[in-house]
Structure formats: structure tokens, C-alpha cells
């Protein structure tokens, strides 16, 4: 899934890693073995976002972003699976996502 992206160049722009998991948390693909914990919670993050959005008429969550002090986590549900991307807070996340999944 991530084979076509130039991960070294993305890392220079603030990309930390990416992982794809199915709804049960099983890892489909990852840019690093260090992302296993992130992958195991991606499905839960998507489910919680749907539960929060439903009462407000948000039928389907397209993207979830969580910003920490130094890191931004992006979770994108995709056909029952989930893509998770970690970047530094200074990274242009839209640009990085475009290169990873575009």
C-alpha cells in the first residue's frame, strides 16, 4: 500500500509513519514495526468518531485528526479498513496524505 511513496522524502517533510489495519485491528501494511499499537486502536478511533458524529447528523466520518504537543495523528476510514498516519505538528499533512493515498 505504501510502496509507491518516497518515504525518505516524506520523512524530511515531517512524516513519521503510516499503518493500515482492518476493523478488528489486524495490520494490513505499515511503514515501520513501531506502529503496531497505533494500528491496533485505529478501528476503535473510527467507531468512536462515528458515535460522536451520529447525533449531529454526520453520516460518515471522512477523517479524524488528533494533535498532540509534537505529533499529529490522522485516521481515515476506508471501506471497512482504516489508514493511520503520524506526522510532526509542523508537517503539511494534506500534502503528505495526497502522496500516500493519492
Image (cartoon, rainbow, N blue to C red):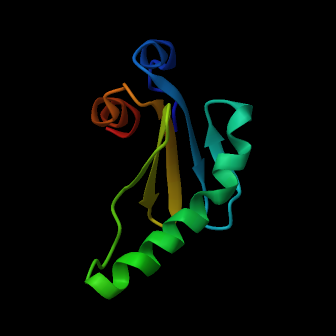
Task: Name, please, the residue furthest toward the bottom.
Answer: 55
Q: Quadrant of residue 53?
A: bottom left
Q: Considering only vertical position in the picture, is 97 above or below 11?
A: below
The answer to whether residue 25 is left or right of residue 15 is right
Q: Compare residues 69 and 73 and report the one nearer the observer.
A: 69
User: Residue shown at 49%/41% (left/top)?
Assistant: 68
The answer to whether residue 67 is left or right of residue 24 is left
Residue 93's spot in the image, x, y percent?
A: 34, 34
Task: Name, please, the residue furthest toward the front.
Answer: 69
Residue 22's spot in the image, x, y percent?
A: 61, 60
Q: Considering only vertical position in the picture, is 72 above or below 28?
A: above
Residue 67's spot in the image, x, y percent?
A: 44, 44
Task: Name, please, the residue furthest toward the left.
Answer: 57
Q: Compare residues 48 and 81 and report the one nearer the observer.
A: 48
Q: Compare residues 8 and 47 and report the one nearer the observer.
A: 47
The answer to whether residue 55 is left or right of residue 19 is left
User: Residue shown at 44%/21% (left/top)?
Assistant: 14
Q: Quadrant of residue 77?
A: bottom left
User: Residue shown at 25%/83% (left/top)?
Assistant: 57
Q: Considering only vertical position in the picture, is 12 above or below 89?
A: above
Query: Looking at the image, can residue 97 be seen?
Result: yes
User: Residue shown at 31%/38% (left/top)?
Assistant: 102
Query: Looking at the image, can residue 3 be seen?
Result: no
> How many numbered tags mark residues here?
0
Residue 28's spot in the image, x, y percent?
A: 64, 49
Amino acid at each position: 500500500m505504501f510502496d509507491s511513496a518516497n518515504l525518505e522524502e516524506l520523512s524530511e517533510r515531517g512524516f513519521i509513519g503510516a499503518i493500515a489495519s482492518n476493523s478488528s485491528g489486524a495490520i494490513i501494511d505499515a511503514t515501520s514495526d513501531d506502529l503496531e499499537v497505533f494500528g491496533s486502536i485505529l478501528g476503535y478511533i473510527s467507531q468512536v468518531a462515528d458515535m460522536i458524529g451520529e447525533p449531529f447528523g454526520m453520516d460518515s466520518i471522512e477523517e479524524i485528526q488528533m494533535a498532540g504537543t509534537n505529533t499529529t495523528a490522522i485516521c481515515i476510514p476506508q471501506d471497512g479498513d482504516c489508514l493511520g498516519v503520524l506526522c510532526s505538528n509542523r508537517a503539511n499533512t494534506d500534502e503528505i496524505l495526497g502522496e500516500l493515498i493519492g
